[in-house]
Amino acid sequence: MSNPYLEGLLAPVTEEVTAHDVPVTGRVPSELNGRYLRIGPNPLGLEDPESYHLFTGDGMVHGVRLRDGRAEWYRNRWVRSRRVAAKLGEEWPEGPVFDDFDFAPNTNVIGHGGRTFALMEAGFRPYELSRDLGTLGPCDFGGTLKGGYTAHAKKDPATGELHAVAYYFGWEHLEYTVLSASGLVTRSVEIPVADGPMVHDLALTQKYVIVYDLPVTFSMEMAMSGAALPYAWNDVHPARIGLLPRSGDATDVRWIDIEPCWVFHTMNAYDDGDRIVLDLVKFPSFLRDGRLEGNPPPVLDRWTIDPAAGTVARQTLDDRPQEFPRVDERLTSLPHRYGYTVASQAVGDDLVGEALLKYDYRTGRTDTRLFPAGSAVGEAVFVPAAPGSGEDDGYLMTLAHDAERAATDLVVLSAQDFTGAPVAVVHLPVRVPSGFHGNWLPDDD
């Protein structure tokens, strides 16, 4: 029996590679000085490939260093958890794991306070990385993090603080934290919940932290049977969203019931007078029987929340299958005009990215940038041309597979010329397996 998550563009690579002076078609903008990093599952030494689940592969970080108009280097490195270090015959760098719960994070990689972190959820701590992607070890932010962390923290552009909501199967609550710009947890709120829900993301406005409590929950039955990912759709778990005032505590959370659905990723949210506008990608349901296959495709929604009335008006803006929504992150918690997603087409039971979509929420226009079949294009990361440039004045970075080379390109687009020729294409020397999230980490951050 084969496993589709170990084949094709999802198949793991088997070597760590370092390449210098990576070839470029076009021109790398001279203002792009930093690292584009992307992470995803890349299982090492699987004992039972047939039972492998895409979400549980050891994390590998891929990085491209841009400086002075050049692609200075490409590197890929496994995150050295205890297991990975042992498989590689290396000494584990050690560090403060939570509840003896250790894993090589595979979901997101971010920069914060001049440091680099690989992120995971479900009770796992971040791993700190060096600038050249070496593993420094698990991190509890100077002893201030009680438990695990999240894959999706939201940075307040005014304060530089990271807002996060973490979950763990052994808790009867969610843990909301605020991480200071200097890397210490300065605020923590335990929010009681039932059934151990999976909470992959959150939303942030100037007034509220928006918490998703949706019907994908921990399954003890699956855990006892040895399931790699013991979470599944739960028909009896109510769907609701919680509004936590930024300065409030657990008793201040306002819960609003909604029709059952699942949300992996928020595009952005903001306050609109007394209401809240929330843009996101919605699954009608997800992980039925714990399976990735066979779920209805995700669509782009706008939810308008009226806290006083306790209502959520949900509108589907685009019913094409899509995921990985992004905005200019300088506008996190603030009104945005533009948003970007990865459009997907069905290939068997899988959704494979073949296009990027750009939404103009002011005019209602949607632009589609098609990629060749089999590109498996990744999420579009917006990078401003300068710190003070306008929302659409900058670049979009994404990874796309080049079938002719059987390798991957880092594609740099002009955000204002979304469907035009790329500004630059960096031709990486190897294939980057289809993965999860990436970000741009400028040298001055």
Image (spheres, helix red, strand yellow):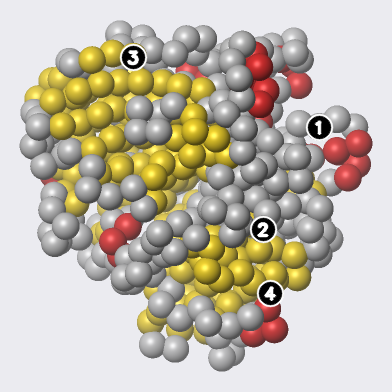
In space, the residues marked 2 and 3 are separated at their CA atoms by 36 Å
Which secondary structure, mark 2? loop
User: Does 182 sit left or right of 287 as displayed?
Assistant: left
Number of numbered callouts drawn: 4
Q: Secondary structure at mark 3?
A: strand
Q: Are marks 1 and 2 in contact (CB under 8 Å)?
A: no
User: Looking at the picture, how far across and down is residue 246, in whole percent?
Assistant: 51, 78
Going from the N terminus, do you reach mark 1 or mark 4 first?
Answer: 1
Image position of 176 with respect to 231: above or below: below
| Left or right: where 168 falls relative to 439 | right
Q: Considering only order in the chain, which callout, 4 or 3, is on the residue closer to the N terminus? A: 3
Task: Say which quarter of the image contains residue 335.
Answer: bottom left
Quadrant assignment for the N terminus = top right
Which three-letter amino acid code belongs to the residue tagged 3? Answer: Thr
Q: Kindly state the secondary structure of the residue where label 1 is placed.
A: loop
Mark earlier in primary sequence (1, 2):
2
Disc marking residue 227: 1
Mark 2: amino acid: Lys
User: Mark 2 — residue?
Assistant: 146
Amino acid type assigned to the residue bearing label 4 in the image = Asp
Dot 3 crowding, Cα within 10 Å, few <14, some 14–19, many 20+: few
Between disc 1 and disc 4, the foreground one is: 1
Chain-order first, disc 2 or disc 3? 3
Residue on which the image places disc 4: 257
* Identity of the residue drawn at 58% across and 77% down: 243
Question: Mark 1 or 2, which is nearer the eye?
Answer: 2
Q: Residue at x 53, y 82 (%)?
A: 247
Q: Residue 18 has which mark?
A: 3
